[in-house]
Image (tube, rainbow, N blue to C red):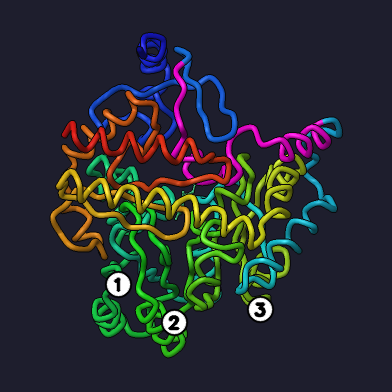
Amino acid sequence: MYNKSEIAFEQSKKLIPGGVNSPVRAFKSVKCNPIFFDHGKGSKLYDVDGNEFIDCISSWGPLIFGHADKITQEKLNEYLLKGTTYGAPTIIESKMAKKIIELVPSIEKVRMVNSGTEATMSAIRLARGYTSRNLILKFSGNYHGHGDSFLIKAGSGAMTLGLPDSPGVTKNTAKDTIIAEFNSIESVKEQFKQNLDQIAAVIIEPVAGNMGLVKSRRDFLVELRNICDENKTLLIFDEVMSGFRLAAGGAQEVYNVIPDITTLGKIIGGGLPVGAYGGKSEIMDFLAPNGPVYQAGTLSGNPLAMSAGLSVLNRLNKKLYEKLENITKKIEKGFLKNIKETKSKAIVNRAGSMMTLFFTDQEKIESYNDAVRCNLDQYAKYFKNMLDMGIYLPPSQYECMFISSAYSENDIKKIIDCNKKSLELL
Ligand SMILES: *Cc1c(COP(=O)(O)O)cnc(C)c1O
């Protein structure tokens, strides 16, 4: 069934570390070999063996309209003919900035970069420069890309592979990152007490998607905002995942809690490598060439990537989010019914079109400590069952499903039916 993928993996392992360019793709935690893909169309992915899958990952979030989206392609074609990059200003960069500022409540000025990792790394440098303080507070199980300062109690691949502290991150760097527990304001207060006037910024995924889907409680975010204000600490929302996905204005719009700096990625590039960070003008103007904090990028804001991203941002509206909500709610309902009928020990966490089925006998998953107590063996078996029935899920319990607007009623029904069969087979 996966012959050509097996051969491709044997090859790539000789050429690329682990055969992949990003660790979770290797399928290690679900104990099988990765599938190699040939093309995508709408809600579907097609592998090199010709198998068809309903894609429940959307390239880890970016493809909100599904694969090979026509309008994005047309815009890309238009810009491709003009050349791909000039390393000089273009008008489309201002159009992009204007759109982002319009959509994201906290952003008055924005700087484009090339990935989510770059956005978060730059955001904490800016926060440190602006506040003249060193410490960054992050939450266990939150993932902010692979910057050294963040590979401490990180989620996503670092959690999947059991590498919470990566070798190569120096002790001196690690000591400037302090940790609190997600959804625990007490743990935040404790850190502020112990590190008075030293914390430059608190960075958080307001809706965490990198330990499986875990929502923060609104009162927790409100308190966090207050504590940051009281201590003159900047609050950074890492909305690389939640931005433009939960709503056009991201989690900050949904929760109505406004951070000082917001980091963006994934959807913002419409499938091309793009990231961004933005916030209050006063803070953003601390960046070079206006201010002393340096940050740059040869390909930052290149017109090709901007054209893809802007074509997506221009189509984010209420109707789209209602559609995504309806599709994902149906899938959630189906899963919950199946869990009940098959007497499975599992629960579902969902926020908009992000969702995780956790194998656990706990009643809720609200933190890293809850998430790590899930049954990973069961998830691995469930994943394989679903894969063989043509449903492509995240290859780890600690990631979430991302639903696109390209799903048909048939896709929804098939996902729910296969979920039932897969649970029965466990
Ligand atoms: C994906 C992600 C990142 C990293 O983005 P890359 O583009 O993979 O570098 C950072 N923060 C969050 C919340 C993410 O989900």
Inter-mark Cα distance, 1 to 2? 13 Å
Whether residue 121 can be seen here: no
Amino acid on which the number 3 mark rests in the picture: Glu
Crowding near the residue tagged with mark 2, few <14, some 14–19, many ≥20 C-alpha atoms within 10 Å: many
Q: Disc 2, ligand 1: is the CB inside 8 Å?
A: no
The correct choice, above or below, for 341 with respect to 198 in the image is: above
Amino acid on which the number 1 mark rests in the picture: Asn
The correct choice, above or below, for 123 with respect to 415 in the image is: below
Q: Is-magenta flag for residue 188?
A: no
- Judging by the rendered image, the residue that carries numbered circle 2 is 225
Q: Secondary structure at mark 2?
A: helix
- Judging by the rendered image, the residue that carries numbered circle 1 is 183
Crowding near the residue tagged with mark 1, few <14, some 14–19, many ≥20 C-alpha atoms within 10 Å: many
Inter-mark Cα distance, 2 to 3? 18 Å
Q: Is residue 261 left or right of residue 316?
A: left
Q: Nearer the viewer, mark 1 or mark 2?
A: 1
> What's the magenta region?
51-80
